[in-house]
Image: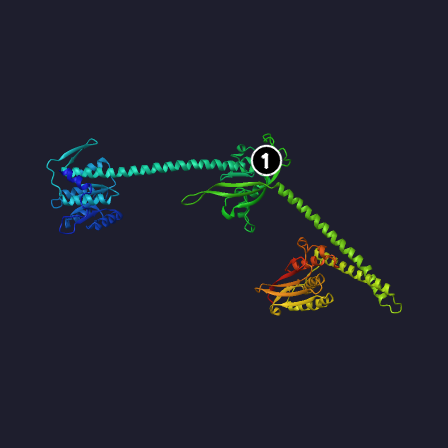
Amino acid sequence: MILAVCVYFQNNLFSLNLIFHDYMTKILIVEDSKTQGLLLKSTLEDAGFEVVCAEDGRSGLEFARRHTPDLIITDIRMPDINGYELAWEIKNDFVLKRIPVILLSHLAETKDIIMGLESLADSYVIKPFNEEELLTNINFLLTNPNEECQNPLSVVLDNEVHPIRSNRRQILCFLVSTYETMISRNRQLLEVQTKLRLLNDQLEQRTKQLEESEIRFRSLVETVPDIIYRIDEEGYIVFINQSIRKLGYEPKDLVGKHFSEIIAPHQVDQVSRKTALASIVDNQNYTEPQPKLFDERRAGERKTTGLEILLKVNQSDNVVSGIVDALENDYVDMEVSSIGMYQLSEDNNIFIGSVGVIRDISDRKLAEKYLKTAKQQAEKANKAKSDFLSSMSHELRTPLNAILGFSQLLRTDDDNPLSADHADSLREIHHAGEHLLDLVNEILDLAAIESGKSSLELEVVSPADFLPHCQNMVRILAKKYQVDFNYEVTFPYENYHVRVDLTRIKQVLLNLLSNAVKYNRKEGTATLKCENFNDEYIRISVIDTGIGIAKEDLDNIFEPFSRAEKSKHVEGTGIGLAITKQLVDAMGGKISVSSEFDKGSVFWIDLELVSKD
């Protein structure tokens, strides 16, 4: 009957909060761990009990003797008086012996259970406790007081006899409580085992995926034409891919060797971390950026990129056949990018080596050499051209001035007037001479600009200092060509300033305006317009309704001696726009053009606004 009652309550068929007392049940908790004590207290108070805590066995015993609690829950491992001793003292006290005692501990060995029975404790619960299990034990013990044992038992454990004075119900409930606790722990263990088995399956699957990924990655690395390497923290090669064979090495022969064995000897100290960084530490006046390193330790934005070095070609007997037959030099130009690798840890990341990519740049170096040589030759040829044009222009200008001078004298000689035919011929000679002189002057101007001999005198001026002058001069030309000329200013430009060479900006604008008139059609329109863009820059536009420029001619319109096909019937040198662009660029401006064939063109110049001061 006692077994049935015990199992009945242990299987939670009893209401957890049902207490058959007319007052609030008082429970004493004896626990040296404040955390465990507070947890127990909170659980029991929520169940409707009055709870008092004692921090050790002695103070718990003293409290029990003064206040006589209804039930005692005690930890086993405590200083001074442990839980077994406290239970024994309670059960051997005439006044306190009927108070139920529950032992609460991490202990779960057979010896612990025997010692619990020896101490006459009523029940045993293993930490961490199950709230429902604990409350069931409490309610059962409170409503079913124990009777004294009439016939003590003895148990032999490890060759020692242990007298058990607990009554049968105590023994049974103690054992059932322990058994159920073990069953619960076993169930939890099985759940953990199931989870571990699942995690293990997942781990095996992830490991397989990782192995497959590693195989794919290694295949990718081996097919990359660049040399990919990994070195350890001391600089010894751990891995290098098949591309190293281009230099005559087998990857397996380099593994375990120091990276310095494949680098030109005179460059090792410059790219090795130990030697390169040591030179910086020793030099207190060092102001250059930190050196780029083959065995780079840094990561992120501070990693090494674009390190140019020379790698040694394998000239030994172990050269890979057919790989380096075409390499005649002892070294090959290479470019290295490297970064440090770290093993993550809780305290500090541990440096475990470097990885890098080495790219063959010998073709690029050769191209750079050819390009440099070609540039020098082009500059030399351009200088020779400018010198030739300058010399020839000076030589041409002297006889041209004589021709123009004598033709002018002949035209104005009233004592010996020319016939009408001779006067017309002389007028053509004089006109052709002036055109040729203009061409010579423009060639000289272009040569001076290209050679850097033409200096600008930049000053801060207002658009009002040069635009009115230009529009007044072009009106005469427009009238001659029967072109309507407009002048538009959309803001008070006298209050704004730009930095230009006053003479040169007038030259630029007069050239654009004269073109807008000469390449216009009869009764057409030419417009000089000035606009302000967000107080950042001004735009000076020259707009015409002339013949326009074909799309295929626009790309070369600012090249010297370049003239649009449809404009060749108009007299010109083909140099004016080239000079105009170079002058605008030299003054920090920007010139652009848009045009539509047979409808007209727009040339505009953007100049940055500056303060007057």
Location of mark 1 (residue) = 247
Direction from residue 561 to residue 409 in the image, left or right: right
Direction from residue 353 to residue 194 in the image, left or right: left
Q: On screen, 123 above or below 498?
A: above
The one nearer the camera, 605 or 73, is: 605
The one nearer the camera, 182 or 262, is: 182
Task: State the image quarter where residue 169 is shown.
Answer: top left
Q: Residue 208: x, y in percent? A: 42, 35
Direction from residue 523 to residue 61 in the image, left or right: left
Residue 76 in sight: no
Residue farthest to the right, as pictured: 416
User: Disc 1 residue type?
Assistant: Leu
Quadrant occupied by the C terminus: bottom right
Quadrant occupied by the N terminus: top left
Q: Residue 429: x, y in percent? A: 82, 61
Q: Residues within 10 Å of mark 1 (few under 14, many from 20)?
A: many
Task: State the image quarter where residue 262 is shown.
Answer: top right
Residue farthest to the left, as pictured: 150
Q: Residue 89: x, y in percent? A: 16, 43
Q: Who's the residue at 76% across and 56% down the image?
A: 390
Residue 497 in sight: yes
The one nearer the camera, 436 or 207, is: 436
Identify the secondary structure beneath mark 1: helix
Q: On screen, 246 above or below 372?
A: above
